Amino acid sequence: MTKLIGIVGSARKGNGLTLTKAALEGAAEAGAETELIRLADLQIKPCLDCGYCKAPENKYCVQKDGMQEIVEKIEAADGIIFSAPVYFGRAPALFLAFIDRMYAMVRADFSSKIPKDKKFGTIVTIGSMGEDVAAGVHGSNAHVFGGMFGWKDCGFMWKNMMHVKDAAEKNPEYIAEAKAFGKKFV
Ligand SMILES: Cc1cc2nc3c(=O)[nH]c(=O)nc-3n(C[C@H](O)[C@H](O)[C@H](O)COP(=O)(O)O)c2cc1C
């Protein structure tokens, strides 16, 4: 059975959460086992660039915070949907701290410590900016998870006018689109 996790990078319980839940629901309808993670519920400290994770005997980060749990869930998953709002034209600090901490999962030669047979995609929520900005957020994820980790890129979905907290919830077309997006991972 496909295991799919959704990792929500917005601190508010808003549209990214709604759309990620819908994507996981769509995947579950197609037979996946799903789990939702809100980064804001966990403590994620900044990467220290201390080099501990680059010693061959150290698989995980030296910092034992919420990141350990996320990494273990990622290791066990077949697919990961990332959700990030756009703050000042890029993903928010919370999400970027998570991305930086994934550095622990590549070796000194930049090979991956995580198996490559995973899929990833991004749900981008934006206030007023357009698709180019959403593509940039997904592109930076693709650089990390497609490029360094070698996972299969399932693309992104994006919506703007999402500054209204319940905008997605009130739009059945957006929910349907998110459900269809989730099914791509099964
Ligand atoms: C600190 C901050 C910066 C933001 N910067 C932008 C921006 O540069 N461009 C934009 O279109 N929207 C911007 N927004 C609006 C958010 O993108 C919008 O509220 C977001 O889509 C909400 O997503 P969520 O409901 O998933 O949390 C910003 C919001 C915050 C709080």
Image (cartoon, rainbow, N blue to C red):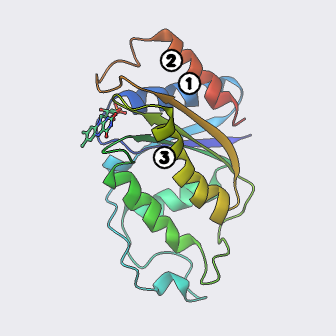
Q: Nearer the viewer, residue 6 or 174?
A: 174
Mark 1 falls on what kind of element?
helix
The amino acid pointed to by label 2 is Tyr
- Secondary structure at badge 3 equals helix
Label 1 sits on residue = 178
Task: Name the spot of residue 73 as percent of width and height, x first.
Answer: 55, 54
SS type, badge 2:
helix
Which residue in the structure is indicated by mark 3?
Answer: 137
* First in residue order: circle 1 vs circle 3: 3
Amino acid type, label 3 = Val
Q: Quadrant of the N terminus?
A: top right
Which residue is painted at 55% across and 61% down in the image? Answer: 72
**Position above or below: 49 against 36:** below
Q: Residue at x 46, y 86 (%)?
A: 51
Q: Residues within 10 Å of mark 1 (few under 14, many from 20)?
A: many
What residue is shown with label 2? Answer: 174
Which image quarter: residue 38? top left
Residue 108 figure quarter? bottom right
Image quarter of residue 154:
top right
The reply to whether discs 2 and 1 touch (Cβ–Cβ < 8 Å) is: yes
